[in-house]
Image (cartoon, helix red, strand yellow):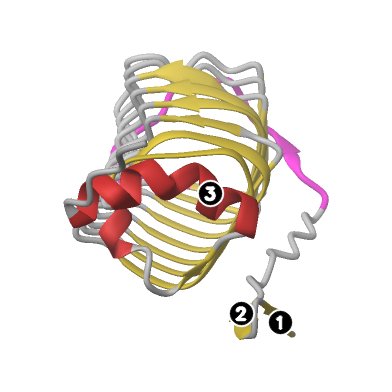
Amino acid sequence: MARRAAGETVRAARRPEVRLPALERHGGGGLEPDGDYDGLDMREADFAGQDGAGARFMDCALTGCALDETSLRRARLLDSVLTGVRGVGTDLAEATLRDVELVDARLGGTQMHGAVLERVLIRGGKIDFLNLRRARLKDVVFEGCVLVEPDFAGARLERVEFAGCALRGADFSASVLVDVDLRGAAPLEIARGVDRLAGAVISPAQLLGLAPVLAAELGVRVVA
């Protein structure tokens, strides 16, 4: 459904509609490369340092799991809900997330460069130094979360919404933005790539806040 702001049309992101079936309790085993996990309830599992590269998670619930230095490179997470997961250095490079909800996560240094996110809701929690370089995001909502120095350099963002979340020190260098709604970001802090905001919508108050960055980008000196 389209909505209007400042005379422009912004296509709203389509949120995931995850309806998990009756789940089977995870037996407690570790992750395996190219593993196949279907319809599992994974609770308080410690996957720290494990290798699940190329694994597929379908109709799964991961709750309170530890993902420190866990390798999920090129993994596929489909129709799944991750709640309260935590970890530093989780590797999701080139992973695919489709119809996924990530709720109240506490993550740092997560590697998602080259990943594909489609119909993903990231709600609550805090993610520090999220690396989304050259990733593709379509129909993604960041809601009520804190993002510290997220890196979107070279990424493509289409129908992405920041709703009631803090965006601190973001890097949009060489990115492409299409129907990106930044009006709900408070604060909205862009460290690099302010020149790539074509295709995004911001509020009048945010425009005033970004004025010094825009002036510096244009080489304009502001002298009283």
Magenta range is: 22-36
Nearest to the observer: residue 176 or residue 30: 176
Whether tag 2 and tag 1 are in contact, CB under 8 A, the answer is: yes
Residue wearing tag 3 = 208
Of the two numbered discs 2 and 1 on the same chain, state the one appearing first in sequence: 1
The percent coordinates of residue 52 (x first, y second) are 34, 35
Determine the CA span between mark 2 and mark 1. 6 Å
- Residue drawn 62% across the image and 58% down it: 204
What element does badge 1 sit on? Answer: strand
Left or right of 2 on screen, residue 86: left
Quadrant of residue 40 in the image?
top right
Of the two numbered discs 2 and 3 on the same chain, state the one appearing first in sequence: 2
Nearest to the observer: residue 223 or residue 108: 223
Q: Up-down: is 97 above or below 186?
A: below
- Residue drawn 65% across the image and 16% down it: 44
Residue 180 visible in rendering: yes
The amino acid type found where label 2 is placed reads Val
The label on residue 10 is: 2
The percent coordinates of residue 185 (x first, y second) are 61, 45
- Give the foreground label among 2 and 3: 3
Determine the CA span between mark 2 and mark 3. 21 Å
Q: Residues within 10 Å of mark 3 (few under 14, many from 20)?
A: few
Q: Residues within 10 Å of mark 2 (few under 14, many from 20)?
A: many
The amino acid type found where label 3 is placed reads Leu
What element does badge 2 sit on? Answer: strand
- Residue drawn 21% across the image and 58% down it: 154
Quadrant of residue 126 in the image?
top right
- Magenta residues, dominant SS class: loop
Location of the N terminus (image quadrant): bottom right
Left or right of 164 on screen, residue 194: left
Residue 120 visible in rendering: no
Residue wearing tag 1 = 4
